[in-house]
Structures are given as structure tokens and as C-alpha cells.
Image (tube, rainbow, N blue to C red):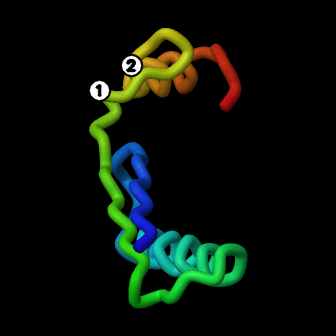
């Protein structure tokens, strides 16, 4: 019984999450021969203030990138 945990920052639409679940399911079926009815996928949305990137919290990283340059994603 495959279990997949996907962690993303908040903001994905329901439609995007549904597409992600379908794509991951299809991949497990295609590459590992798993049955769709046995696949469990959990999407955890993490607030940007609880996710770090390049030494900064993601919300701060995005603010700095928007304000005046900084790192490219």
C-alpha cells in the first residue's frame, strides 16, 4: 500500500492539488505496477512562515525577491 506525503507551501488551488494526486497515482501505477485503489496520497500545506529557503523563512524570501532582486527561484 503506497503512501505518499507531499508537502507544499500554501496557495495551490483544489484543481492543482487534484491534478497532482492524479499524476502521482498514475506514476505509481505506470512505474511500479501499483493498483490505484491501494495508493494513499496526503498533501500537507505549510504556511510560508513555517518553511525555510536560502536561510530565510519563505514569506521573507518572497518579500525580498519582490522588493529588489535577491535570489532567483
Residue 44 position (above or below residue 72): below
Residue 59: percent from the left, percent from the top? 38, 26
Where is mark 1, residue-wise? Answer: 49
Residue 63: percent from the left, percent from the top? 45, 22
Q: Quadrant of residue 4?
A: bottom left
Q: Secondary structure at mark 2?
A: strand
- Is disc 1 surrounded by few (<14), some (14 to 19) or many (20+) residues within 10 Å? few
The image shows a total of numbered marks equal to 2
Q: Which mark is residue 26?
A: none
Considering only order in the chain, which callout, 1 or 2, is on the residue closer to the N terminus? Answer: 1
* Horizontal side of residue 39 vs 46, given as left or right: right
In contact (CB < 8 Å): disc 2 and disc 1: yes
The extreme top residue here reads 55
Q: Quadrant of residue 9?
A: top left
| Disc 2/disc 1 C-alpha distance (Å) | 6 Å
Residue 15 position (above or below residue 53): below
Q: Quadrant of the N terminus?
A: bottom left
Q: Quadrant of the C terminus?
A: top right
* Horizontal side of residue 34 vs 17, given as left or right: right
Look at 39% across and 19% down and name the residue there: 57
Look at 56% across and 71% down and name the residue there: 24
Residue 21: percent from the left, percent from the top? 47, 74
Q: Secondary structure at mark 1?
A: helix
Q: Which mark is residue 57?
A: 2
- Is disc 2 surrounded by few (<14), some (14 to 19) or many (20+) residues within 10 Å? some
* Horizontal side of residue 64 vs 7, given as left or right: right
**Which sits in the foreground, 57 or 31?**
31
Look at 31% across and 52% down and name the residue there: 44
**Which sits in the foreground, 17 or 41?**
41
**Which sits in the foreground, 53 or 71?**
53
Look at 28% across and 38% down and name the residue there: 47
Amino acid at each position: 500500500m503506497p503512501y505518499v506525503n507531499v508537502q507544499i507551501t500554501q496557495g495551490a488551488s483544489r484543481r492543482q492539488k487534484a491534478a497532482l494526486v492524479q499524476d502521482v497515482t498514475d506514476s505509481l501505477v505506470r512505474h511500479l505496477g501499483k493498483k490505484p485503489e491501494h495508493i494513499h496520497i496526503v498533501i500537507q500545506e505549510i504556511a510560508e512562515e513555517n518553511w525555510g529557503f536560502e536561510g530565510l523563512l519563505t514569506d521573507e524570501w518572497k518579500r525580498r525577491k519582490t522588493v529588489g532582486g535577491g535570489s532567483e527561484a
